[in-house]
Amino acid sequence: VQLVESGGGLVQAGGSLRLSCAASGSTFSIKSMGWYRQTPGNERELVAAITTGGGRTNYANSVKGRFTISRDNVKNTMYLEMNSLKPEDTAVYYCNAQTWSFFNYWGQGTQVTVSS
């Protein structure tokens, strides 16, 4: 499975960004997908996740009500709509895909910078 993210950038606080993650390869093996983020010196943390079957979602408390995760199974693409962005949302955002055998694939990461 290959994952390619796009959509990061610089935005002012209160603004919005939309991240995309296009999956290719053995996409039939994917059980769930998610977005993680990481800042220097910190561990990568889960932002949001979605199952590819039933579309169940899970969000970090810090982004609930502001971020929305979705997926298009026909296009094999996952999205993260980020609204009301805060400076503390600044991080490198990574796309993740987990297979039914619990193997994890990662994208290359995309930088999101929110200025105050």
Image (cartoon, grey):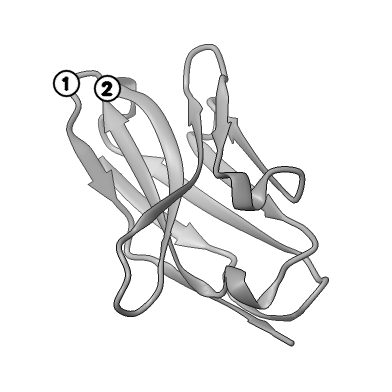
Residue 69 lies in quadrant: top right
Circles 2, 1 touching at the beta carbon (< 8 Å): yes
Depth check, front residue: 19 or 88: 88
Q: Earlier in the sequence, mark 2 or mark 1?
A: 2
- The circle drawn on residue 42 is none
Q: Residue at x 40, y 56 (%)?
A: 4
Q: Amino acid at mark 2?
A: Ser
Which residue is the extreme one toward the top?
A: 54
Q: Along the horizontal axis of the image, is 7 left or right of 43?
A: right
Q: Along the horizontal axis of the image, is 56 left or right of 101?
A: right
Where is residue 19 drawn, in percent x and y? 59, 57
Q: Is residue 19 above or below residue 49?
A: below
Determine the secondary structure under disc 1.
Answer: loop
Q: Which residue is mark 1?
A: 101
Q: Quadrant of the N terminus?
A: top left
Q: Mark 1: give few (<14), some (14-19) or many (20+) Cα within 10 Å.
A: few
Q: Along the horizontal axis of the image, is 17 left or right of 3?
A: right
Q: Residue at x 73, y 67 (%)?
A: 85
Depth check, front residue: 21 or 43: 43
Where is residue 18 drawn, in percent x and y? 67, 58
Q: Is residue 72 above or below residue 44?
A: above
Which residue is the extreme one toward the bottom?
A: 116
Which residue is the extreme one toward the front?
A: 61
- Distance in Å between CA atoms under marks 2 and 1: 8 Å
Q: Mark 2: give few (<14), some (14-19) or many (20+) Cα within 10 Å.
A: some
Q: Amino acid at mark 1?
A: Ser
Q: Which residue is mark 2?
A: 29
Residue 15 lies in quadrant: bottom right
Determine the secondary structure under disc 2.
Answer: helix
Q: Residue at x 48, y 14 (%)?
A: 53
Q: Quadrant of the C terminus?
A: bottom right
